[in-house]
Image (tube, helix red, strand yellow):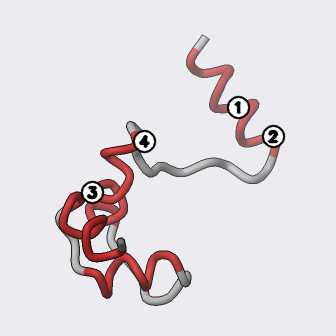
């Protein structure tokens, strides 16, 4: 199953295993490749509420 998944997203089986086990340090382009079939993309989310509030105020 993992081999099929890796061929569908275009990354190695080892890379998928590393992502699943939270090992290594994958670059954003690899993470996006894995998430693309799910209609998702990686990004940054602020962890402090005041930063999020400031960012949202700038978009209004």
The residues tagged by marks 4 and 2 sit, at their Cα atoms, a distance apart of: 26 Å
Q: Which label sits on residue 40?
A: 4
Secondary element at tag 2: helix
Whether label 1 touches label 2, CB < 8 Å: yes
Tag shown at residue 50:
2
Q: Which residue is mark 3?
A: 33
Q: Which one is earlier in the sequence, the residue at label 4 or at label 3?
A: 3
User: Of helix, strand and loop, which one carries label 4?
Assistant: loop
User: Cα distance, mark 1 to mark 3?
Assistant: 30 Å
Contact, CB < 8 Å: mark 4 with mark 2?
A: no
Q: How many numbered markers are drawn?
A: 4
Q: Mark 2 Cα within 10 Å, few/some/many (few <14, many 20+)?
A: few
Q: Nearer the viewer, residue 11 or 45?
A: 11
User: The residue tagged with tag 1: helix, strand or loop?
Assistant: helix
Query: What is the spatial separation of the Cα atoms under label 1 and label 4, in whole angstroms?
Result: 25 Å
Where is residue 8 shown, x and y percent of the image?
21, 58
Dividing the picture into quarters, in which one does residue 15 lie? bottom left
For the point 36% across and 71% down, which residue is it? Answer: 1
Residue density around tag 1, few if under 14, some if 14–19, many if 20 or more, within 10 Å = few
Closest to the observer, 6 or 49: 6
Residue that mark 1 sits on: 54
Identity of the residue drawn at 55% across and 81% down:
22
Q: Earlier in the sequence, mark 3 or mark 2?
A: 3
């Amino acid at each position: 199953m993992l081999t099929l998944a890796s061929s569908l997203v275009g990354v190695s089986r080892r890379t998928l295993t590393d992502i699943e086990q939270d090992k290594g340090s994958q670059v954003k382009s690899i993470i996006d490749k894995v998430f693309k079939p799910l209609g998702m993309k990686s990004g940054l989310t602020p962890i402090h509420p005041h930063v999020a509030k400031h960012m949202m105020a700038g978009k209004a």
